[in-house]
């Protein structure tokens, strides 16, 4: 599989967790109680799968390969993608601290959580679209087939180093568990 196809497949899984997170936000905004454990599980998925696994592949491998192939980093699409990853991390930090407050019954914790989560969902949804529609097309045209094959095998190494053997399947189960709870009508199972 092409490296950009692997990343696109991961985007589909991340989008499903964003949909779960959106449903959790709906419930909190309607004043319904949400199991605090589930807020933490969504954050864990985002931090471990979306950031440490997926963003690491982009930041440590795909983007540097594109730069070496002549795609500018600063003032270009790669710089924008990197700054959006950082912006996203700030929203996730906000979600994590609001989640701790929610568990302890702190006033406004639910609103703080949804504020950060809604911003994160909007940011990452647009980010994924830009990568799928523009950046990955640039990668496919700039990178030789040899380089693409090298990247695809390097992705495996990063995954093992960053999240460890067997973790991918664990995230797959976590995503499906959360989908079954929050999006029960969406019966499609995801492949990570
Ligand atoms: Fe990205
Ligand atoms: Fe991405």
Image (spheres, rainbow, N blue to C red):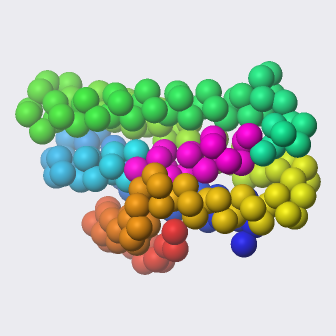
Residue 173: x %, y % from top left: 35, 71
Give left or right: position of 43 versus 189: left
Q: Eyeballing the image, is 168 above or below 119? A: below
User: Magenta stretch containing residue 62, yes or no?
Assistant: yes
Give left or right: position of 169 versus 127: left
Q: Residue, x 25% and y 42% (percent of image)?
A: 28
Tell me if residue 3 can be seen. Answer: no
User: Magenta stretch containing residue 133, yes or no?
Assistant: no
Q: What quarter of the picture does the N terminus occupy?
A: bottom right
Residue 180: x %, y % from top left: 32, 71
Q: Residue, x 25% and y 31% (percent of image)?
A: 98
Magenta: predominant secondary structure element? Answer: helix
Residue 72: x %, y % from top left: 84, 30
Give whichever of 159, 72 is nearer the camera.
159
Give whichever of 84, 184 is nearer the camera.
84
Look at the image and give the residue range highlighted in magenta: 48-64
Residue 178: x %, y % from top left: 32, 63
Tell me if residue 185 can be seen. Answer: yes
């Amino acid at each position: 599989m092409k490296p950009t196809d692997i990343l696109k497949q991961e985007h589909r899984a991340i989008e499903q967790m964003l949909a779960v997170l959106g449903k959790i936000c709906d419930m909190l905004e309607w004043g319904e109680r949400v199991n605090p454990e589930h807020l933490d599980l969504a954050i864990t998925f985002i931090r471990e799968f979306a950031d440490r696994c997926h963003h690491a592949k982009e930041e440590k491998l795909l983007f540097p390969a594109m730069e070496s192939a002549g795609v500018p980093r600063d003032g270009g699409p790669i710089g924008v993608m990197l700054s959006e990853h950082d912006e996203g991390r700030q929203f996730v930090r906000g979600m994590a601290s609001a989640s701790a407050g929610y568990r302890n019954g702190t006033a406004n914790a639910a609103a703080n959580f949804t504020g950060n989560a809604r911003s994160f969902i909007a940011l990452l949804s647009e980010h994924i679209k830009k990568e799928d529609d523009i950046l990955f097309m640039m990668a496919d045209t700039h990178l030789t087939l040899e380089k693409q094959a090298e990247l695809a095998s390097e992705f495996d190494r990063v995954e093992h180093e960053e999240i460890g053997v067997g973790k991918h399947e664990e995230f797959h189960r976590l995503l499906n568990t959360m989908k079954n709870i929050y999006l029960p009508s969406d019966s499609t199972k995801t492949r990570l």
